[in-house]
Image: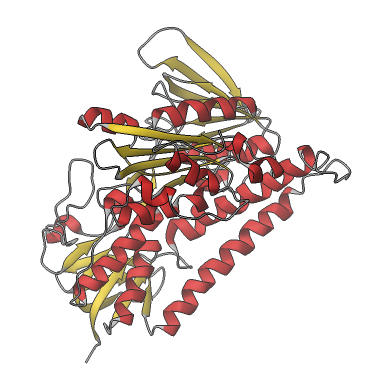
Amino acid sequence: MADVFDLTIIGSGPGGYVAAIRASQLGLKVAVVEKWPTFGGTCLNIGCIPSKALLHASEMFEEAGHQFKQLGIDIPTPVLNLPQMMNHKTDTVAANVGGVDYLFKKNKITSFRGIGTIAAPGKVRVTPQSGPTVEIETKNIVIATGSVSANLPGIEIDEKTIVTSTGALSLDKVPNKLVVIGAGVIGLELGSVWARLGAQVTVVEYLDRILPGMDSEVARQFQRMLQKQGIEFKLASKVAGIDKQENGALKVRVEAAQGGAGEVLDADVALVAIGRKPFTEGLGLDIVGVALDERGRVRVDGQYKTSVDGVYAIGDVIAGPMLAHKAEDEGIAVAEILGGQAGHVNYAAIPAVVYTNPEIASVGKTEDELKAEGIEYKIGKFPFTANGRAKAMLATQGFVKILADVNTDRVLGAHIVGKNAGEMIHELVVLMEFSGAAEDLARSTHAHPTLSEAVREAALSLGDGAIHI
């Protein structure tokens, strides 16, 4: 008789593999279906992990060329070895996906290679690249198939000169001119990589601002920082088309978003980074009756259950921010629910990070959202120019901004622009998780000298005032 699993997960990205491990820890018999040769999904293979490898390497290259001299380190002008930088990226990916493989074996998780389709409630059909189809019997199914890059009508992606994030992570040479379509997180991160390595980068954005959804003050200040780094912006603009020339060069046709005169930008590479869309292709959702919403996302209730009994969904394929750690938390939550526990995700305290230089990190409400909701709030701010450690590190760009309720002092949101912002945001996440007040943070001792002192100073400024400004 064939094995019957307690849980079968389709997709092994951050949501899927974390759900599998947590479910196994809780004593469930778990199977995972993955169509790619390696585990880890977009994040580990062609997204978060490889992009951070290149972001770090390009930052080191830029620092060696521009900051070492001021620090008293005299070296010849650094020379880019792009193939070795790409090798570093490849090695980083291999180590991470290999780690998931190890964790699956350690937790006795059964893996199936191929495209997973829900044949019926309790049945998952796996179609491998070669060989016979396999049918899995399972008590529960979790859809964790993630998302794919969205595209513009009439633009043909070849991942060589017209690329998504996938192609932008594997260019074999630095483009002289790179046009980035979309001023969201992915576009700015990858645009900054190639700008640091020598490309002339122009970002075209349909809206009149960068980083839609982020605090507007943060976005404005950060745009100025990127412009000082040489990145050019064309806001309130749209790309009408991209024409390939016989010599391989591109002509990017740009128009005003609301109509008007257009222009043509020359480019060697165009990166389409207008966002991502949920991936549900080939899952058989229409056959079994799993309902989707108006944006093609799987509809779920508060327990991650779809419209079909025994079928659940998590991560980028459902509503909410498309963040790897959001998918991980949902993976843990759904595993705990299926294991008889009370799984839960606090969506009000999920941090978001832009891994540029400086970084941006945020959690909770933006000023724009608080104004729209009519909530009375107060602002505490502290600049890194007044932080001793930041001065020593030549990292004085940016600030910490904390938003708290006027009446209760409860922290409602926090936004950091600065070096290592992504590491500093988490004390604010913990504070908000426990409904903490700004005074709680202001009265917590912070080691000196650290960048994190700026967080405390911002909290102090919400009360009697910061010390160092």
Q: 429 or 18: nearer the eye? A: 429
The chosen color scheme is secondary structure
Q: Residue at x 40, y 7 (%)?
A: 260
Q: Residue at x 58, y 66 (%)?
A: 94
- Residue 210 point in image, percent of width and height: 45, 28
Q: Quadrant of residue 402?
A: top left
Count of marks overlaid on the render: 0
Residue positioned most to the front: 464
Task: Classify residue 281 as left or right of residue 393.
Answer: left
Task: Classify residue 152 as left or right of residue 457.
Answer: left
Q: 249 or 438: nearer the eye? A: 438
- Residue 237 point in image, percent of width and height: 43, 19
Residue positioned most to the bottom: 1
Q: Is residue 175 visible?
A: yes
- Residue 323 point in image, percent of width and height: 38, 51
Q: Is residue 174 visible?
A: no
- Residue 267 point in image, percent of width and height: 60, 26
Q: 236 or 410: nearer the eye? A: 410
Identify the image quadrant of the N terminus. Answer: bottom left
Q: Residue at x 28, y 81 (%)?
A: 26
Q: Quadrant of residue 68?
A: top right
Residue positioned most to the top: 261
Instruction: Please say if 232 is above or below 308.
Output: above
Task: Classify residue 156 as left or right of residue 453.
Answer: left
Identify the image quadrant of the C terminus. Answer: top right
Task: Classify residue 439 as left or right of residue 183.
Answer: left
Instruction: Please say if 38 is above or below 250.
Output: below
Q: 405 or 135: nearer the eye? A: 405
